[in-house]
Amino acid sequence: MASPEIDALTQALSRLPGLGPRSARRAVLHLLKKRETALEPLLRALEAVNERLVTCGICGNVDTVDPCGICADPRRDARALCVVEDVPDLWALDKSRLFPGRFHVLGGRLSALEGVRPEDLGIDTLVARVEAGGIDEVVLAMNATLEGQTTAHYLAERLERFPIRLTQLAHGVPVGGELDYLDEGTLAQALRARRPVA
């Protein structure tokens, strides 16, 4: 039987995405076995992030500085802006190193079922950024869900009055995907987004 403190640590870890009670218990046992090399560095890293964590006042990213490292990077193309639903989407796109511009985090997506309205998201700040000028292209990088596409449609309507190029991520057959394993929605989108063979 573990002490209340160890149980509390296990329960805290089990609430993290991707970790259930068993995985959390294994992680705790590993941390306890490797106290100097695993537990103490983890504690220091958590404390440092907890003390310095802020939300970027420009894009909505989370970082330990404001503006965040992406917004402060002079090598980024300030004329291109990629709009994402949430921070994990920003991090995934940034990790790919395929988008040279800056980002804007909405903080979610429109959802009538969940009661998420336009004023609950960072849409007004996005419109203000575009209205301020200096942006040539806005890429709508919403998830390929009904709510994501509803959000993209709403953003397109809000941004249509500005002289910008408005684009959206392509959806369809994934690289390495086999047609007989794809759902009808993915196939339909792939057919609608077909392009000439180069």
Image (spheres, grey):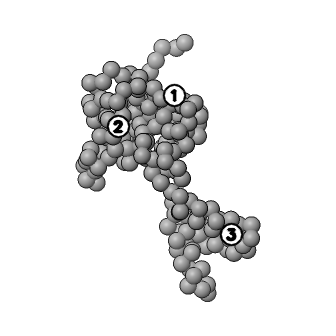
Q: Mark 1 Cα within 10 Å, few/some/many (few <14, many 20+)?
A: some
Q: Amino acid at mark 3?
A: Glu
* Label at residue 126: 2
Amino acid at dot 1: Asp
Q: Quadrant of residue 145?
A: top left
Residue 72 lies, in percent from the top left, at 53, 39
Ranked by sequence position, the earlier of labels 1 and 3 is 3
Asked which secondary structure carries label 2, the reply is helix
Check disc 1 and report its element: helix, strand or loop: strand
Q: Residue at x 56, y 36 (%)?
A: 73
Amino acid type assigned to the residue bearing label 2 in the image? Leu
- Spatial CA distance of label 1 from label 2 is 17 Å
At which x and y percent is residue 186?
A: 43, 34
Q: Is tag 2's residue or tag 3's residue first in the polypeptide sequence?
A: 3
Left/right of residue 183 with respect to residue 176 in the rendered view: left
Q: Is residue 98 left or right of residue 113?
A: right
Q: In terms of sequence position, does the residue under pointer 1 or pointer 2 come before the other?
A: 1
In percent of the image, x 35 and y 37: which residue is there?
Answer: 126
Q: Which residue is mark 3?
A: 40
- Cα gap from disc 1 to disc 3, whole angstroms: 39 Å
Q: Decide: is 115 above or below 39.
A: above
Q: Which mark is residue 77?
A: 1
Q: CA distance from mark 2 to mark 3?
A: 40 Å
Q: Is residue 26 visible?
A: no
Q: Position of residue 10 (x, y in %)?
A: 57, 74
Indicate whether 169 appears above or below 25: above
